[in-house]
Structure formats: C-alpha cells, structure tokens
Image (cartoon, rainbow, N blue to C red):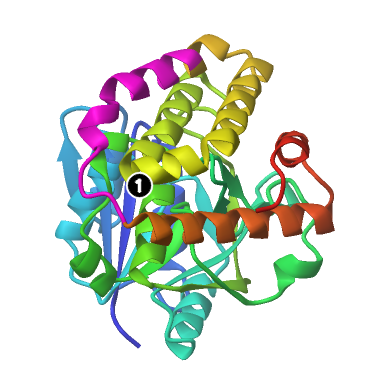
Amino acid sequence: MGTVSAIIPTWNRAALIERILTNLAEQTRPPDQVIVVDNGSKDETLTIAKRLGADVIAFPENRGFAVAVNEGIQGSTGDWILILNNDVRLEPDWIERLLATAEQENAAFAVGKLLQEDDHGTLDGSWDLVSKAAYAWRCGWGRPDEGIWRVRRKVQLAPMTAVLFQRRIFDRLGLLETRFESYYEDVDFGIRCTLAGFEGIYEPEAVALHSGKATLGKNGARVMYLSARNQLLILAKHYPARTLRRFAWPIFVGQMLALAMTAKHGHLLAGLRGKTEALLRWRSFRSGLQTASLIEAAMSQSESEIRELQKKLGFDIYWRLYFSLVPPA
C-alpha cells in the first residue's frame, strides 16, 4: 500500500482538532503524515495540533477551504492525499478499509459512508451528483442507512468531507479552484475528474460520523451566500455558450428553486447576494471551456442518476419540484 498524507483545514475549532488528531492516531492504519492547515484561528488550535504531532501550516487570516487544502497538498509527501473536515470522526479501520478498496479497484479516489453524528442510523452523505443546473445532491443525506447505501459502487464526484485521492490526480488536473473559497469546490473538482476520465469508488464499510458544517453552521447566511454564488460559477466555468442555451430551462428552474431553498432557511437576501456576485464575476471564469458535447454528456448522466435514485427512494421536495418541471432528456 502507498503512503498517506492527511490534510485537515480548520478555523477556531480547537476541540474538534484534538478529537480528529486523536482519532487518526488510533486508526488501524494511521496516516504517514498529518497536516493541519489553520485559517487564522484565535483559540488553542495551533498549540493542540503541534502537541499532537501534526505538521502545521498557519495563515494569519481565514483564506477559505480551497486555499487551505491546496497548501496542504503542496506540503504533503504521500502517494495518497486524505482530505478531512475537522468535524469528522472515523471508525478505527476507516483508512485501512478505504485504502485497500481503492487499490483493489484501481480507483483514482475513494469515499466511505458518512453517518450523522447525532443519529447513527441516518446518512449524512456518500458520493455526490449534480444536476444540469449545477445544483448538487449529497446522495443519501437524511436517508436511513439501508439498501443501496450498503453496496460498493463506482462514483464520479467525491465530497471532500472525507475522501482519499491518488496524488497523480492533482499532478494531472491541478489543485482546487481557490476562487470558490469554500463550498462547491469539491463539485468543481469532481466535474474536472469526470471530464478527464478519472473514476472513484464508494466503500460503505468505511464508516465515519459527521456533525456537519460545524464551523459556519449548517444553514447560516455565509453558507447560503457561498453556495448560491458558486452554483452559478460552476456554470460560468464549465458551460460553453451552446450548453448554456441547450440547458437554459433546467438552469432557470434549478436556480430559482435554489433561491427558494435559501428563502426557506431564512436567508433569501444572502442567496440573492450570492447570485448577483456570481453574475458580476461571470466573465472572469469564461476561459478554457470544455467541448460542449463532453460537459453535456457528463451533466446529463449525473442528472439522470439523481432522477433514478430519487424515484427509487422517494423525492425530496427540491427534486420533486425540479423534475416535475424538467422533463427527461
């Protein structure tokens, strides 16, 4: 098995850093290197990270998730890059199981099953899918841990809550898109992996618990702003003019429903600010666009998988409304 470098971005969560570093040390197959990238914490994060033996990269201010992960990758030495949120708790054999599966399946990356920390029978996530409107679904979120979530399968998009990547992917594709700051940078990277032909694996026996957006809050205004903005920036970065025209109706429906979701959580203004900011920055993302046929095929396939899974499991409100207005291709 290859060597593993773990990268943990963090900001003002000393207790969580102590927990995840202890958790990593207790793994049946501990990482060969652990890097904590601190985004200007004012608490005891740095002291704890150093005491527990992590390599530390410290920023004077919060530069966002993507910048922190990129700095960690550049400072790492492993054959495999393990990216972890600070609010994850891994089962003792998580790294061992995930690494064995990835190497057995010759996968470019691997993800395990995330359960909600306050309800171990409920999914927090697995793999990701994204619609033509660039609205992402963390597959399984809020669903009982049963059925399809217990079956190993190939996947295209990996949430960066807890994921293992071969280093060669970053050597080939480059690092995370720092202009996203936080949220949807993993969706962007997953789209880039898909277009380059990289495929991952979901291993349900690698189980972790996740408290969910512990730093910024699950449905806080900042989260809503960044998500709303970055959904449109995904379109700006990846969709040629032809694709924008062909997917115009799904984009309109999906983005209007996305704003409705921000309103549901009491943050419509933050959502509108995010969309406005994205439109102001639109032109700066319009370079190096993919061939229209490639991105259209990838997004159509992903949306088709969302439709089929939602139909099988029972539709969430967003997807019920979206697919009632957007017919199958």
Q: For the view shown, which residue lies furthest in the top direction?
A: 269
Write down the region rendered in magenta. 272-290
Decide: is 128 above or below 231.
below
Residues 75 and 254: in front is: 254
Q: Quadrant of the N terminus?
A: bottom left
Label 1: how many Cα within 10 Å (few below 14, some 14–19, many 20+): many
Quarter where residue 324 is shown:
top right
**Residue 240, position in %: x, y?**
34, 45
Q: Amino acid at mark 1?
A: His
- Asked if residue 280 lies in the magenta stretch, the reply is yes
Q: Is residue 113 magenta?
A: no
Residue 184 coordinates in the image, percent (x, y): 42, 42
Q: Which residue is mark 1?
A: 238
SS assignment for the magenta stretch, majority: helix
Residue 158 visible? The answer is no
Counting from the top left corner in percent of width and height, residue 126 is at 60, 59
| Front position in the image: 197 or 288 | 288
235 in relation to 105, above or below = above
Nearest the eye: 25 or 108: 108
Say how many tags the image has. Answer: 1
Question: Residue, x 49% and y 65% (percent of image)?
Answer: 156
Of 121 and 311, nearer the camera is 311
The picture places residue 168, in percent across and down from the top left corner, at 24, 74
Along the horizontal axis of the image, is 148 left or right of 177? Answer: right
| 257 left or right, relative to 232 | right
